[in-house]
Image: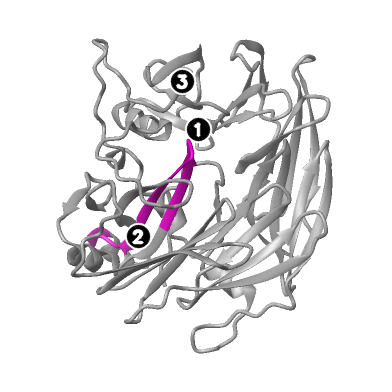
Amino acid sequence: MGQTVLNSFPLTLDASSENIQTLNVEDVKTNDIYVFAADDKNINISKYNKSLFLTSRFTDSIRTPLNKSLNGYSISEDGNPLLYWGSQDAKNLKIVKYFLDLKTARILNFDFPENNEYIITSFQKNNVFYMLGKEKGQKHLLLYEFQNGKCEIKMFDLSNFNFLTEKGQAFSFSLLIRSYPIQKIESDNFNSLDKTSSINKMYVLEDHIILTFDYNTQKTQVLDLNLQTLEVKEKTFSQPDSKKTAKSSNSFYTDGKLFQIKANNDEFLYDIKDFDSGQILKSISVSKNDTIRFKNSPLLVQANNKKPQEVKTTAKFLKHLSDLSVGVSVFKQNNKNYVTFGGFVEYVFTNYNSMDDILGEFGIGARPSYDIQNKMAFFDSTFDSNFDFVSTKQSEPLAIDNIYYYLSTNKNASLQNILKLKDYYILSYYDNALKQFILRKFTDGFIREDNGNPIMNKSVFSRPASFGVIKTR
């Protein structure tokens, strides 16, 4: 079976709560699994051993003020979990340590420096919680490392680096990341095009943070932050040379390689480069009159998360793609590289209805409504370990495809979390109808019906198109 129920337990969450949040995490030292589920009133914690047997459960009242979001977690050396609740103004963290054996909790408080401009992102690595921040008027980044109830602050100096447009005009790092927020990429997991089409991205490696910037269509600018020495190194990779000016270009880092993509109405180009040496390993150019032969799926266009529609010619595909922010996503599994080429854009329209206009005449503030629309164009490719194209007419879906297929058919699933383990994935979600929190195991291969026949789901129709607003150039 492609998916198996590992565990389920009854859970009542306050449906009226605006602060329902869940986390599904692994203790990387013991391989224990934790499930955190919270509403405005209570936090429910379930702990499972590596065989997914329940070993502890604890329900506690929420010990943090309202309007705080669950930013992340860490696991202390004594084996107890800590949750980090952040304020909307990024000024304060409430840190709650839970002692599961004693059924008690302790609250810690952390205030960010007064000149903290904003928090760029947060992440977990090796049971440690991190937040990357920017101070006002300063040419550096601060990395807050939270471990065992203490915080160590590391500074990365960016004063020696310049940020220039195609015309050579300089601008500040603050302006760059405020205009185009940095998107954190999951290095060992599938990343959808709505994330990878962001022009500023962050990759967390073992001892490094890689920041890539694709605001300039002529190059990819990279900053390599060493977490041990605090040294920052700059790398620059020229984008593929197109015959016609391209409105959009992008990159994606994976396993010591940098994919670069560029497109316009007439051309589709991509390079694969060695990250350390800059050497070009692959360079492909396709014109609008050519057939794209390195694809394992049709050329597809999807609007507003509806069913994707096939595009028959390269020229029509490029016409759609030229209006989007291009991107590429690479997912490595079983010595193969599963690549999605394409682009994505999301627009937010503000509307005022006629009643709002009438109220406005009487001095009453109009209440805007928001209409969000998105569009994606894409196709899938498979490459071997040497990045040579692998032609497969019908390949078995990956576990991540089975997860998205399952979610597309289960309308009662909410508060989903996906956790990748060594050999399989765990999907955790709240079943609104059953009032249960459920953990399911997913593996590569077809999901099979009761009669044993595989469900021939197309992965490209199952993966989500978008999760958030993506700005375009």
Q: Secondary structure at mark 2?
A: strand
Q: Is residue 245 above or below residue 41?
A: below
The magenta stretch spans residue 336? yes
The disc label shown at residue 468, or none: none
Residue that mark 2 sits on: 343
Residue at x 78% of width, y 24% of height: 79
For the residues carrying marks 1 and 3, which lies nearer the camera in this image?
A: 3
Residue 52 percent location from the top left of the image: 59, 15
Q: Secondary structure at mark 3?
A: strand
Pointer 1 with pointer 2, Cβ within 8 A: no
Q: What's under tag 3, amino acid-wise? A: Arg
Residue 421: x, y in percent? 57, 29
- Name the residue rendered at 43%, 16% in the picture: 4
Q: Which residue is mark 3?
A: 440
Residue 180 locus on image (x, y percent): 51, 67
SS under mark 1 = strand
State yes or no: discs 1 and 3 in contact (Cβ < 8 Å).
Answer: no
Residue 299 belongs to the span the image colors magenta:
no
- Secondary structure mostly seen in magenta is strand
Query: In this picture, which residue range is highlighted in magenta?
Result: 328-355
**Can residue 364 be seen in this snapshot?**
no
Q: Marks 3 and 2, Cα distance to the nearest angstrom?
A: 31 Å
- Mark linked to residue 417: 1
Comparing 317 with 90, the one in front is 317
